[in-house]
Image (cartoon, rainbow, N blue to C red):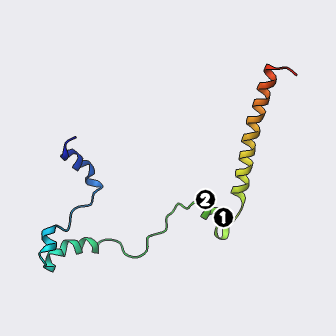
């Protein structure tokens, strides 16, 4: 691949180069204006809470605490294993009567 193609593909991932070595080494505060402007536009304060919560937070913590997911998980595993065991049993008796 050519370097320009790689640069174009990574353009959305890699942030723009705001502070250049010449601006930083000049010692003048006015040269840092673009950097200060960039950081002043970033959101301030705590990050918003995510809309999607995990299973533990949704079912086991807080006012909605319940063991229902654990019970349903155990029942699901039991039902699946019973179904597989029953099918294996039928296949065994189909080929070997008695």
Sequence-first disc among 2 and 1: 2
Residue 43 lies in quadrant: bottom left
> For mark 2, what is the residue?
55
- Residue 48, placed above or below residue 84: below
> For mark 1, what is the residue?
60
As drawn, the residue found furthest toward the right would be 98
Gap between marks 2 and 1 measured at Cα = 8 Å
Can you tell which mark lies on residue 25? none
> Please, what secondary structure does the residue beneath circle 2 have?
helix
Q: Position of residue 45 (x, y in %)?
A: 40, 76
Left or right: 44 in relation to 60: left
Left or right: 21 in relation to 75: left
Q: Position of residue 93 (x, y in %)?
A: 82, 24
Which quarter of the rendering shows the N terminus?
top left
The residue under the point 73% across, 35% down is: 84
Badge count = 2
């Amino acid at each position: 691949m050519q370097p320009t193609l790689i640069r174009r593909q990574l353009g959305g991932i890699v942030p723009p180069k705001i502070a250049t070595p010449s601006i930083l080494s000049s010692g003048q505060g006015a040269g840092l204006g673009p950097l200060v402007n960039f950081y002043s536009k970033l959101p301030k304060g705590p990050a918003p809470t995510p809309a999607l919560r995990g299973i533990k937070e949704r079912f086991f913590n807080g006012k909605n605490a319940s063991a229902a997911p654990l019970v349903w998980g155990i029942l699901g595993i039991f039902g699946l294993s019973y179904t597989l065991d029953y099918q294996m049993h039928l296949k065994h008796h189909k080929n070997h009567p008695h």
